[in-house]
Image: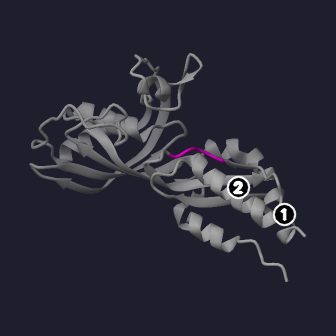
Amino acid sequence: MQQEQGIFSQGKVILIDKPLTWSSFDVVNKIRYAIKKYEQKKKVKVGHAGTLDPLATGLLILCSGKMTKQIEQFQGQEKEYIAQITFGFTTPSYDLETELENEKDTSEITLEKIKDALKHFEGEIDQVPPIFSAVQVDGKRAYKSARKGEEIELKSRKVTISELEILESDLSEQKAIISLRVVCSKGTYIRSLAHDLGKQLETGAHLSGLRRTRIGDFKIEDAQTIEEFLEKWKPKEKQ
């Protein structure tokens, strides 16, 4: 007998707090497998509404069954992130997936200079995605070409950044790091924001940490870990 009348097959929104190093597809595959075991079904539809990089954590919306039809709607909603940005180095991927390079002096950076630079990124802006991204160029994912060392040129796109708030800063002669709350539209790359901010300040910068905290009305506080989901939806033992 199917458990709880196929609650997931019928359609459900699942909020997961994605752990570090997991890809979004890793999470989907894990949850889908657990659901199939719970409902004793060979096939269950599960998809995610907006990917998170392996080096990012936080809110991932999964949809099952009939709710997969809502994925596009969820993807288009406003998002909130907490980003850690480290100045003084760039990386080819704009985050810690690739090696640090182009070391620059950060001793002259001040909070006021960072705040002034951030003003250039408020509202609707033109943003170029990182070459290490899933954007398609001539039918190929940009990151696949980038990893082969191929030259790639990506076009800028319009995105909207509605809020930028510095939550914490650690600025000294040895290091310059900020924690930044970002509220933005679909398609915004926080890695590109970090890179472009470093360019604006002429110090270089990269994204050293990222957590997604909100998608539309869905909040990270309402999400569960993968372990919590697996524990809650374990198949019930036969009597």
* Disc 1 residue type (three-letter): Gly
Front one among 209 and 202 = 209
Task: Decide if residue 161 is in sight here.
Answer: yes
Which residue is located at x 67 percent, y 73 percent? 232
Q: Which mark is residue 32?
A: 2
Mostly what secondary structure, the magenta segment? Answer: loop
Which residue is located at x 85 percent, y 83 percent? 239
Measured from the top left, where is residue 27 in percent x and y? 60, 53
Nearer the viewer's eye, disc 1 or disc 2? 2
Front one among 153 and 27 = 27
* Relative height, residue 224 to residue 78 (above, below): below
* Relative height, residue 98 to residue 74 (above, below): above
Mark 2 lies on a secondary structure that is helix
Q: Which residues are magenta?
A: 48-52
Which of the 4 image quadrants contains residue 206?
Answer: top left
Horizontal arrangement in the rendering, residue 61 relative to residue 113 (left or right): right
Residues at marks 1 and 2, CA–CA distance in whole angstroms: 13 Å
Residue 6 painted magenta: no
CB-based contact (under 8 Å), mark 1 and mark 2: no
* Relative height, residue 197 to residue 6 (above, below): above
Nearest to N terminus: mark 1 or mark 2: 1
Which residue is located at x 59 percent, y 44 percent? 50
Mark 1 lies on a secondary structure that is loop
Q: Could you classify mark 2 by the number of other residues whose Cα lies within 10 Å: few (under 14), some (14-19), or many (20 or more)?
A: many
Q: How many marks on residues?
A: 2
Horizontal arrangement in the rendering, residue 121 relative to residue 106 (left or right): right
Which residue is located at x 25 percent, y 32 percent? 200
Front one among 43 and 18 = 43
Identify the residue under disc 1: 6
